[in-house]
Amino acid sequence: MPDFDLLITNGQVHAPQGFVRATIGVRGEKIAALLEPSTPCSATEVVDAGGMWVFPGLIDLHAHMREPGYTHKEDFFTATQAAAAGGVTLVVDMPNVEPPTDTVERFLEKKRLAEQKCVVDWGHWVAGTRPEEIPRLAQAGATGFKIFQVKGAYPHDPRLAINDEGKLLECFAAIARTGLPCHVHPFHQRLFEHLSEEAWASGKPKNHVTFGEVYTDELVWKTAISTLLHLQKRTGVRLQVLHTHSAESLKLLKRAKADGQKVTVEIDPKYFHLTREDLERKGPRCCPGGFIVEDPERMRVIWESLSDGTIDHIGTDHAPHLVEELEKQRENAWDAAMGSPQLEHYLAVLLTDVRQGKIGLLPLIKLLTENPARHLGIYPRKGCIQVGSDADFAIVDLNREWTASSAGLYTKCGWSPYEGWRLKGKVLKTVLRGQVIMSEGRVLGQPGYGRYISGNPRPKT
């Protein structure tokens, strides 16, 4: 009888103490042993890592899987296939679907749909906008809560937005009592509307370029995050601030964390990678990142915050739309879709940053695996490679050079904002709970294999 169900041999394994040359032995869904490479043993299945790097499976806390209601853009099956293709073994999606996930009944129906389709493990952030529903949603097993401060055209559903600070305080207090995290898209809506009116009055068109300039204005973000931090301090809610591309906001957040506030910080790749050149060449598909990348001070603070612990997570904000929906931004960006798919290419983009010396490999892996697992309260079950953990891995060739393409993607929208980029680093295989679910770009995982991750009100530290 074989010693193990699965062996991963000849890999540089990201163990808790750092990278080690080891053989991973898996029984069932768990890591059963980390062995010296020369240890004699047998297994039902052997995966030869060929000297490549074995990371814990990536955890993405910020994806829009578009089901129910917008399945012409994406659905649970295609989104989780895209996740598997990108080395992601756990993804948590958002409540801005149709109908929005703001009641127990809607949450349970959405969960039922996902159970049939998800290839990787998954969770659901639910709307934290209805105080009477918040304790019921927590009891029903929601992973946590999401609130938007921005409202407008989809995906910024006005039904999920809170611009009234009094109501926000009430919702924060209710969520704090559940012990679950509250993720907030920060935004000062009234300032944004005022700055928009000023821009139009000066003769600027209502296109994606003007929208990007106004949408990323430091004032819109810093003022919102300042308020959120005060409300967090009053209520004690476990606040996660999203889209933290504002330099002044990051300085506020660094100070708050130093003062002991329960706040975590997430950034998404488009804001510190997509350039003004991408915007001009590819159009609305790359809005609004270019207005940040061209600001040296913003970029300095972002990279510093990624390295010094101010930023805790990199979430994809995987946000698929059809190209024709985004093209409407050229006429009126205030009334058009916004966002880009990210799951399949974001790790390669970030590994290219490592090769360029912008961030270290070990800090990057922590941002993508350990930190989000701790946030969910499931570390060390997930987010690390050690005996007893789930056998979730991404096997990566750090030296593979390749050009990103929109051809052959699993995301239903069928395009990538990184098309044409020369990248260094590629996921070769993805393993979820002991099963190879992706090999050399081909997703093997079956719909329904993914398992739901419920919220943990008392996360392990």
Image: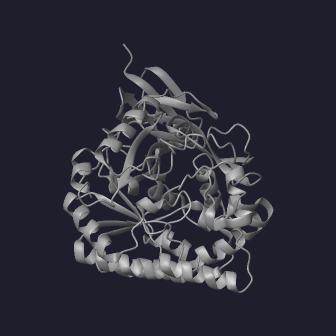
Which quadrant of the rendered structure holds the N terminus? Answer: top left
The quarter holding residue 412 reads top right
Give the image location of residue 29, x and y in percent. Answer: 36, 30
**Furthest-right residue in this view:** 281
Camera-side residue of 203 and 213: 203
The quarter holding residue 116 reads top left
The quarter holding residue 192 reads bottom right
Give the image location of residue 70, x and y in percent. Answer: 54, 44
**Side of 455 relative to 442 (left or right):** left
Residue placed at 47% from the left, 73% from the top?
187
**Furthest-left residue in this view:** 177
Residue placed at 27% from the left, 58% from the top?
461
Question: Please, is residue 158 above or below residue 10 in the view?
Answer: below
Question: Please, is residue 12 above or below residue 319 in the view?
Answer: above
Residue placed at 35% from the left, 43% from the top?
106
Question: Please, is residue 334 above or below residue 192 in the view?
Answer: above
Give the image location of residue 37, x and y in percent. Answer: 47, 34
Camera-side residue of 280 and 304: 280
Could you tell me if residue 23 is visible in this image? Answer: yes
**Side of 253 relative to 429 (left or right):** left
Camera-side residue of 251 and 179: 179
